[in-house]
DNA sequence: TTACAACTATGCGGATCTTGATCGTGGAAG
DNA sequence: CTTCCACGATCAAGATCCGCATAGTTGTAA
């Protein structure tokens, strides 16, 4: 497991690095946002611990750029400010979780574990996320006893979301991957299928929900069990 | 559950054996095709994991000989070559499933479970699924008192479905295995025979039904008794 | 030729997809 | 805090695609 730590306070960064290595993670340290983006773009990390206040490029911007570049590595954002707007901004820019400084080491580790525990997992012919199981060969979505058959488009859209756990999938990506690259399909089309899917999730009474990020796209929210 | 592993790379074979035993299977290992045939002919195994590239007798030939000897133990074929021709050749020689190396252990286990979970049970010269009995020598389908004679194509299609219980058999697989590899038979052809079969199931008033997965294929639904 | 099985062609009906309209809502501007 | 607007959610409708059934044609073997 590789972790990228983006934190400008060197002492804190090094302390984090040491803690992570004690936990058998391999940790890389960088001390500003620009480097953070460069390193993270390699896509080799299993998680990124990202400070908000950074030189050159701030944490929000780092997260935004990574998501724009379709890097879906889970991000744990650190903020000194204990304010709701920051939290929302962080999550909205593509962070998967956040903590406010000062933080408890145990809690940090727990959150990192939660992030690195892959959610969209391929098991044989099926894809699992939260309490949902998507059967790839029969295009059936199951939760507990109940199951529903999905149409082709519904299936493709949901699979996309499940393959990119925790990260926002832009509408344009959904269109190009489900309707085809040269498609002139409207955004509304995606919205319609998201609506269908939410209805089916409701029918299955699944804990998983589909979240919306205005002007961007959708993501799967699978509550930890 | 007994599993036969036919694989010439000893380290891989032993790793597989260990994994299978952790899953409470009893695994026997052999390292070439000739031994593979000899062991498998005993008919005592619930599944065979069979490498394609083998000394003495290759995997295809092993499968072919076993099927020729009416040993119907399910075969999961392993191939290093990720090519369609191999896949088709494997299935055509009598393999039930295949995986390309390198493979994911979880997926392997899932596939083995799928193979051993089979409902279509061979009893002597007949195949059983739910309340149906398909006589392999006379091509008669029986349920209770009534029975019908099946045509060759009907028989082949139904046998395919019974051999893969609960799992969706793609139309293309049906075409390649019933009509032959290079066949240009239309999908409609399959549909026609499915239609015939359903009519006969109805006539027999069997509890077994043939389910459809749009754009993919068919599966047998055998209600638990 | 007749009988039977395999294959082909066709129209219906239902499932799925698309489109457009309307309603709700979050967030920015005032 | 309220208003407004753009965007998203949902619905209804029509269009389209696909599978099913049936009927008709071809091929083959007795």
Image: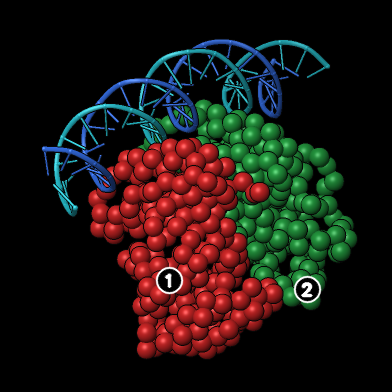
Chain colours: A green, B red, C blue, D cyan
Image quadrant where residue B195 sits? top left
Q: Which residue is found at the position 51% from the left and 87% from the top?
A: B30
Q: Visible in this render: residue B84?
A: yes
Q: Which residue is mark 1?
A: B70
Disc 1 or disc 2, which is closer to the eye?
Answer: 1
Q: Which residue is found at the position 61% from the left and 38% from the top?
A: A148
Quadrant location, the N terminus of chain B: bottom right
Q: Which residue is found at the position 39% from the left and 55% from the top?
A: B139
Q: Work out whether disc 1 and disc 2 sit on a shared chain.
A: no
- Rate crowding at label 1 as few (under 14), some (14 to 19) or many (20 or more) other CA atoms within 10 Å: few
Question: How far across and down, in percent of the image, does residue B91 sit?
Answer: 39, 65
- The residue lying toward the viewer, choosing from B23 and A56, is B23
Q: Which residue is found at the position 58% from the left and 79% from the top?
A: B16
Disc 1 sits on a residue from what chain?
Answer: B
Judge whether A153 appears above or below A101 on screen: above
Residue B114 is marked as: none
- Rate crowding at label 2 as few (under 14), some (14 to 19) or many (20 or more) other CA atoms within 10 Å: few
Disc 2 sits on a residue from what chain?
Answer: A
**The residue tagged with tag 1: helix, strand or loop?**
loop
**The residue tagged with tag 2: helix, strand or loop?**
loop
Question: How far across and down, in percent of the image, does residue B155 sit?
Answer: 38, 52
- The residue lying toward the viewer, choosing from B169 and B43, is B43
Question: How far across and down, in percent of the image, does residue B27 sit?
Answer: 61, 80
Q: Which residue is mark 2?
A: A23
The Cα–Cα distance between marks 1 and 2, rounded to whole angstroms, is: 55 Å
């Amino acid at each position: 497991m590789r972790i990228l730590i983006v934190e400008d306070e060197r002492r804190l960064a090094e302390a984090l690095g040491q803690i992570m290595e004690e936990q058998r993670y391999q940790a890389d340290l960088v001390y500003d946002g620009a480097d953070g983006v460069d390193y993270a773009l390699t896509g080799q990390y299993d998680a990124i611990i990202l400070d908000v206040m950074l030189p050159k490029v701030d944490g929000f911007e780092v997260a935004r750029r990574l998501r724009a570049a379709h890097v879906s590595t889970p991000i744990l954002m650190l903020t000194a400010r204990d304010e709701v707007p920051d939290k929302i901004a962080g999550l909205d820019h593509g962070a998967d979780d956040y903590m406010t400084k000062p933080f408890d080491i145990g809690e940090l580790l727990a959150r990192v574990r939660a992030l690195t525990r892959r959610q969209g997992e391929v098991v044989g012919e099926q894809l699992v996320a939260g309490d949902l199981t998507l059967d790839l060969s029969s295009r059936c979505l199951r939760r507990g006893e109940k199951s529903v058959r999905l149409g082709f488009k519904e299936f493709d859209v949901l699979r996309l979301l499940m393959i990119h756990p925790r990260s926002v999938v832009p509408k344009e990506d959904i269109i190009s991957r489900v309707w085809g690259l040269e498609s002139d399909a409207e955004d509304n089309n995606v919205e319609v299928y998201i609506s269908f899917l939410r209805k089916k999730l409701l029918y299955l009474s699944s804990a998983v929900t589909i979240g919306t990020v205005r002007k961007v796209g959708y993501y799967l929210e699978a509550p930890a069990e």
